[in-house]
Image (tube, helix red, strand yellow):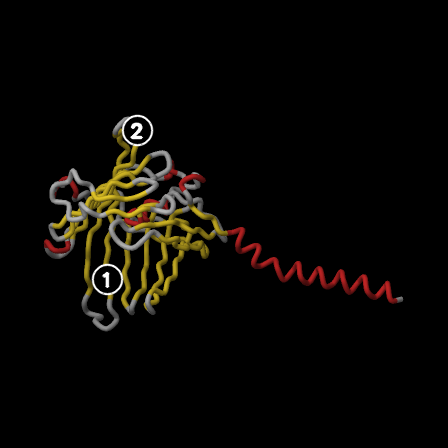
Amino acid sequence: MKTNCTIPAIVICLITLFLSAQPKYTLAQQVDTIRLKDNRLNTASLKPGVRQYIVYFQNPKSPKVMRFWLWLRDTKIETQNGQKVFVTNQHWYGGDTTSYRTVYSVNKASDFSPIYHSETVNGKNKSFNWSNQKIVGADTVAANTAKTYSLDFTGPCYNWNLDMETFEMLPLAAGKTFAINFYDAGYSKPEYIIYKVTGSEVITTYDNQKVDCWILFNESDNAGRHATETFWISKKNHEFLKEEDNFAGMYRYKVKMSAATTNVLPKFGK
């Protein structure tokens, strides 16, 4: 009788330990770390062309006021120094000249690793040469205010200024969680940012199309400042269609305009 009672007790104990360990194990397995060496980004999903977004801010304390911008993101495939690259030009238009900024980024077409990044805000330029090992100020750009900048990396990272394009290349699926090593050129060190696929939703676009989208979500708390970001990326064409942010009581929205919308880029030059 002693033997018959002990064996079931051991079995039950082992089963209990096994089951209690499953949630942690399963969660760890679901996190996809997006590294350059793993080639998890589907670069074929990033289609060349101009993307136009209406960006607006709302402050609940000022319900009659809304701030607007128009963002243009023009991605081309080119050949530079014998290799194919993605070249992305951004133009941000606001209500006055202080709102205007340009961003120029070059990434390898094979894995989207950054090669070069330059941005001009309020007439001041910052330009960087970017590799898997480090980022340094581009000394060939005469007006570069970041000419002496240098930062060594502990590992390759992605350009956080191109998060919208990066999201279009993720292998999105139900229950997925991604850890992406992003870096905002010239600021603090690279860090892994966690994005979770929290579900899906059919949304209506500006041209009255119903599009089934994955919902990608990020939540952070930096220095006591809680913030959330929610992104809608179409399942079929991997288009970044909408973003909704909430931080410090403020709301920011980015909404992709219809492909039929007039392209303002040729009118205003570069």
The quarter of the image holding the N terminus is bottom right
Looking at the rendered structure, which numbered label has been put on residue 83?
A: 2
Image spot of residue 222 (x, y percent): 34, 64
Binning the other alpha carbons within 10 Å of mark 2 as few (below 14), some (14 to 19) or many (20 upward) gives: few
Q: What is the three-letter code of the residue carrying label 1?
A: Phe
Which is more toward the observer, 12 or 63? 12
Q: Earlier in the sequence, mark 1 or mark 2?
A: 1
Q: In this picture, is 108 found above or below 99?
A: above
Which residue is painted at 38% across and 49% down in the image? 181
**Above or below: residue 24 compared with residue 46:** below
Looking at this view, name the residue that lies furthest to the top.
82
| Residue visible at 42% across and 51% down in the picture | 179
Measured in 3D between alpha carbons, the distance from the residue under mark 1 to the one under mark 2, in whole angstroms, is 40 Å
Query: In which quadrant is the C terminus drawn?
Result: top left
Looking at the picture, how far across and down is residue 196, in whole percent? 44, 55
User: Mark 1 = which residue?
Assistant: 57
Mark yes or no: residue 6 visible. yes
Camera sees residue 208: no
**x then y, percent, for residue 21:** 61, 59
Instruction: Work out whether residue 54 or residue 204 is closer to the camera in this orientation and state it.
Output: 54
Is 110 placed above or below 192 here? above
Describe residue 175's horizontal placement relative to residue 139 as left or right: right
